[in-house]
Image (cartoon, rainbow, N blue to C red):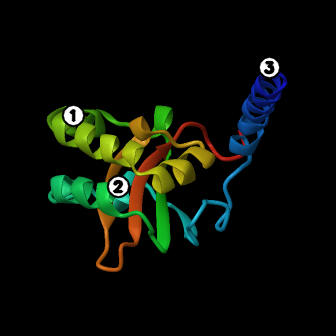
Amino acid sequence: MRLAKTVIALIALGMTAMPAAFAQGVSESSIIGADVTINEVSRDVSEIGLDGLLDNAEDTADRIRLVTDPEEVTIIQLGERRTAITEEIEQFMRDHQPVLADLRNAVQINAVLFEILNAKGIGAPEVLAADVGEDNAITVYAFATQAPGN
């Protein structure tokens, strides 16, 4: 009986300590088992252009699901979502909705990438496109949920 109470107490202690472990912010070396270089670049959507942005999105989504150890993640921030989205971009997202949904799902499934984006305040719905290089470097094009410094 005493052993059972001890085991229950240890389990309860472990459950209360775990959220604190997950609440810590991400840094380039804080992701368990990963040493990832994180780059952030600000660009306007007009600089990048929409043509061809999702041409290989299905293949990219498949590759993102498989990459477990990217050496580098580059986040191309396309500005604040509520001010950066134009009618052209909205139409583009509507026209490519199934492909975007698949790509965003892949981003959510990839634990390393999801943690990096989440720490930067970027959720999967803000992802507009992505690319995976030959060296498994991942580039994500995403809107910010709010302007930097706000």
Query: Counting residues from the N terminus, which is met first, the one under dot 1 or under dot 2?
Result: 2
Between residue 86 and residue 70, name the one nearer to us. Answer: 70
The amino acid type, in three-letter code, at marker 3 is Met
Between residue 11 and residue 63, name the one nearer to us. Answer: 11
Spatial distance from mark 2 to mark 3, Cα to Cα?
A: 69 Å
Residue that numbered label 3 is attached to: 1
In the drawing, does residue 26 fall left or right of residue 12?
Answer: left
Mark 1 is surrounded, within 10 Å at the Cα level, by few (under 14), some (14 to 19) or many (20 or more) other residues, namely few
Where residue 41 sits in the image (x, y, percent)?
Answer: 53, 64
Residue that numbered label 2 is attached to: 46
Can I make out residue 11 in this image? yes
Q: How many marks?
A: 3
Spatial distance from mark 1 to mark 2, Cα to Cα?
A: 15 Å
**Which callout, 1 or 2, points to the residue nearer the camera?**
1
Where residue 10 sits in the image (x, y, percent)?
Answer: 79, 33
Where residue 99 sits in the image (x, y, percent)?
Answer: 18, 42
At mark 3, the secondary structure is: loop
Between residue 83 and residue 35, name the one nearer to us. Answer: 35
User: Is there CB contact under 8 Å for labels 1 and 3?
Assistant: no
Q: Residue at x 49, y 59 (%)?
A: 75
In the drawing, does residue 138 fall left or right of residue 118?
Answer: left
Query: Counting residues from the N terminus, which is met first, the one under dot 1 or under dot 3?
Result: 3
Residue that numbered label 1 is attached to: 91
Where residue 121 sits in the image (x, y, percent)?
Answer: 59, 42
Q: Residue at x 60, y 61 (%)?
A: 32
The amino acid type, in three-letter code, at marker 2 is Ser
**Which callout, 1 or 3, points to the residue nearer the camera?**
3
Mark 3 is surrounded, within 10 Å at the Cα level, by few (under 14), some (14 to 19) or many (20 or more) other residues, namely few
Q: Residue at x 37, y 61 (%)?
A: 47
Question: Which of the 4 image quadrants contains residue 17?
Answer: top right
Question: Which of the 4 image quadrants contains residue 6?
Answer: top right
